[in-house]
Image (tube, grey):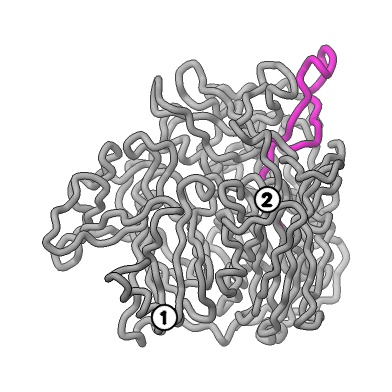
């Protein structure tokens, strides 16, 4: 069994960055509350709200020259029936925003409007506070306090669970730019992070929709503050349909559900405002609560990306939904800022968990009621799979930004009560300091339903294997990206290095270099040609070109890597040894940022299953992995971005640009001065 890190280690902090750390217990500072049957240990009761569905806009019915207006604006929202109504950020008054339905090959114009104003019609400030939980006396991060429900900024009251705000966040106001994640469109329509619109301004974008049916989503992408704007509620679905999908007669209407998953924490009033002996009172506002970390006494403090104890679906915490006993289609996006979900459907009809008996993921009792064949995956980020796929153990990993198109036959489960659960870093019956596993509940009707849908053996006859397409090319462009852990020469954040080969005959640098043994015995030496977003652009691709992206993860947190503009297929996933999850490959030295000796050829990595092999634009990259993905950069031109979709990482050091130009122009561009401008 793989050795798991303990809370005093940095590896634990890196796992906590995605909600993947082992579940904490009393020995780790988690305090067991006094419970009686029926109590809600995290302070809220489950299944008090009906699942809501965002409104749908059939944008494809509009004349091509008539833009659709979508305004980001404030509205009154409530995340749970037992919480007060508060001000949130929305698209068109809805969290998530309206589902925009389009058709393949029919362009749509959208006017994205920033109307996020306060009551005085000034640019609104964030609808939540951003705080940092101090280190423990031992110098370790206080994971239990950061994960516990409640707390507040010290600006809103004193108390042991009041924390200092993160510098500058209290004066942030809404500046927005929208990225339709997965859309094939030119760079000026893609949500370039610098192109923010302030209050009252509009950005008009064209979406050709010249791509197969797929579950896309749109969300804010503003430079350095994407994590805050998305957390505030700025996200929604964008669905492309086509004749291939139509022919499948998939479940539709009320049998097709849009599910945006996200985790949240909630603000509470200070004890002085609640009266003696009162239970913590939630204000209804979210709380963006970081755990601080450092590399030792006297070193600067950093923040671990935020994960919360509550799971929300479409902005509602732990909703319930009644379903008829027939096939349903679940279109799922992980809209969380950092949490990686491992989804499974559990039959809880006869489950009887004793109050307060928290059962962590990994305990055999946790999976006792998992339905191993309930989730039938028919599509991924970029569209339909060639054939339906049932995960071997009934679980599916979903990193931030990834999408799943899933069918469930509730007709086999008449009269049963089911829960969609997260089996990654969570607990059943979670107590404060732990993340609860429950996402939502389905209650299946006892009555038979007329259902003419039959699961087809073939979903997408247009699907083609990119490995074969690549073999038809004379060559493809190679792109090299290295992900290095926090701590390189004291840096607080993980870094994303754009890599280039050390020139033949050149001296290998003493720092910032990655060397890899190749199968022919030679050594490939790579060094960073760019690290930060504003460094010189180094990736230039010709429109229509195939490009093989090599993603190397040398250690630290998992990273859901997202590349804009096109969809990809994974060709290989190999791995170097790391001592434990979240660790660093033995050959990589943090002090110098280099491999002390060439990395050996990597061994086999995690198997590539049918879901991972689908058309995708986002993949979870784990420590020690070398992943190769192949994309065809055809159908759009301009400047685009690639980045980690942990939004805290994206906003700090893990986003870079690349450029796609017509081949003829690129030849001139490369010819000026012997390099790029």
Q: Which residues are magenta?
A: 260-287
Relative image position of residue 397 (x, y in whole percent)? 55, 56
SS state under label 2: loop
Q: Which residue is mark 2?
A: 175
Left or right position of 353 against 459: right
Depth check, front residue: 174 or 321: 174
Q: Quadrant of residue 146?
A: top right
Residue 47, visible in the rendered structure: no
Is 271 part of what is drawn in magenta? yes
Position above or below: 26 against 667: above
Mark nearer the N terminus (1 vs 2)? 2
Depth check, front residue: 197 or 92: 197
Position above or below: 184 against 218: below
1 and 2 marks in contact (CB < 8 Å): no
Q: Which residue is mark 1?
A: 665
SS state under label 1: helix
Relative image position of residue 50 (x, y in whole percent)? 85, 51
Left or right position of 590 against 287: left
């Amino acid at each position: 069994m793989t050795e798991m890190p303990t809370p005093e280690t940095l590896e634990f902090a890196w796992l906590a960055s995605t909600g993947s750390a082992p579940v904490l217990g009393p020995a780790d500072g988690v305090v067991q509350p006094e419970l009686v049957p029926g109590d809600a240990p995290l302070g809220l009761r489950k299944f008090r709200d009906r699942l809501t569905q965002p409104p749908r806009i059939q944008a494809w019915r509009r004349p091509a020259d008539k833009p659709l207006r979508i305004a980001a604006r404030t509205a009154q929202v409530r995340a749970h029936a037992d919480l007060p109504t508060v001000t949130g950020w929305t698209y068109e008054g809805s969290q998530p925003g309206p589902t925009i339905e389009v058709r393949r090959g029919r362009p749509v114009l959208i006017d994205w409007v920033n109307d996020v104003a306060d009551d005085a019609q000034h640019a609104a400030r964030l609808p939540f506070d951003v705080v940092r939980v101090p280190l423990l006396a031992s110098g370790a991060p206080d994971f239990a306090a950061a994960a516990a429900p409640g707390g507040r900024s010290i600006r809103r009251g004193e108390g042991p669970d009041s924390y200092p705000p993160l510098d500058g966040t209290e004066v942030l106001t809404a500046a927005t730019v929208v990225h339709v994640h997965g859309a094939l469109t030119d760079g000026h329509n893609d949500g370039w992070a610098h192109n923010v619109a302030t209050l009252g301004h509009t950005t008009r974008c064209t979406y050709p929709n010249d791509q197969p049916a797929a579950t896309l989503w749109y969300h804010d992408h503003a430079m350095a503050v994407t994590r805050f704007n998305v957390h505030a509620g700025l996200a929604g679905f964008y669905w492309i349909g086509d004749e291939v999908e139509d022919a499948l007669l998939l479940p539709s209407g009320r049998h097709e559900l849009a599910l945006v998953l996200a985790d949240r924490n909630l603000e509470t009033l200070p004890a002085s405002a609640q009266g003696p002996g009162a239970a913590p009172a939630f204000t209804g506002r979210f709380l963006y609560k970081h755990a601080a970390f450092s590399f030792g006494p006297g070193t600067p403090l950093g923040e671990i990306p935020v994960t919360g104890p509550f799971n929300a679906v479409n902005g509602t915490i732990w909703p319930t939904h009644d379903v008829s006993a027939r096939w349903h289609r679940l279109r799922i996006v992980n809209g969380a800022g950092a949490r990686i979900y491992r989804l499974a459907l559990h039959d809880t009809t006869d489950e009887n968990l004793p109050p307060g008996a928290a059962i962590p993921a990994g305990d055999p009792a946790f999976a006792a009621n998992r339905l191993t064949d309930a989730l039938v995956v028919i599509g991924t980020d970029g569209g339909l799979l060639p054939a339906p796929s049932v995960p071997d153990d009934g679980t599916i990993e979903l990193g931030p930004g990834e999408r799943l198109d899933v069918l469930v036959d509730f007709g086999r489960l008449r009269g049963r009560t089911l829960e969609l659960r997260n089996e990654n870093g969570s607990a059943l019956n979670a107590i404060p300091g732990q993340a609860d596993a429950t996402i939502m509940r389905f209650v299946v009707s006892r009555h038979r339903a007329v259902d003419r849908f039959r699961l087809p053996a073939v979903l997408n006859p247009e699907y083609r294997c990119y490995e074969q397409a690549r073999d038809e090319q004379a060559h493809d462009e190679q792109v090299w990206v290295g992900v290095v852990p926090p701590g390189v020469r004291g840096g607080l954040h993980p870094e994303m290095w754009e890599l280039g080969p050390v020139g033949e005959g050149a001296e290998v640098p003493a720092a910032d270099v990655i060397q890899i043994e190749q199968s022919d015995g030679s050594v490939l030496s790579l060094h960073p040609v760019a690290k930060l977003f504003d460094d010189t652009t180094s990736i230039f691709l010709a429109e229509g070109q195939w490009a093989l992206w090599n993603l190397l993860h040398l250690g630290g947190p998992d990273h859901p890597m997202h590349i804009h503009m096109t969809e990809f297929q994974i060709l290989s996933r190999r791995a170097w040894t790391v001592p434990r999850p979240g660790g660093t490959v033995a050959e990589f030295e943090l002090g110098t940022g280099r491999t002390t000796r060439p990395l050996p050829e990597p061994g086999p990595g995690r198997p590539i299953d049918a879901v991972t092999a689908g058309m995708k634009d986002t993949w979870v990259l784990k420590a020690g992995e070398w992943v190769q993905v192949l994309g065809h950069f055809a159908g759009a031109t301009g400047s685009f971005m690639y980045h980690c979709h942990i939004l805290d990482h994206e906003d700090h050091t893990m986003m870079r640009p690349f450029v796609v130009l017509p081949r003829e122009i690129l030849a001139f561009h490369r010819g000026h001065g012997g390099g790029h401008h």
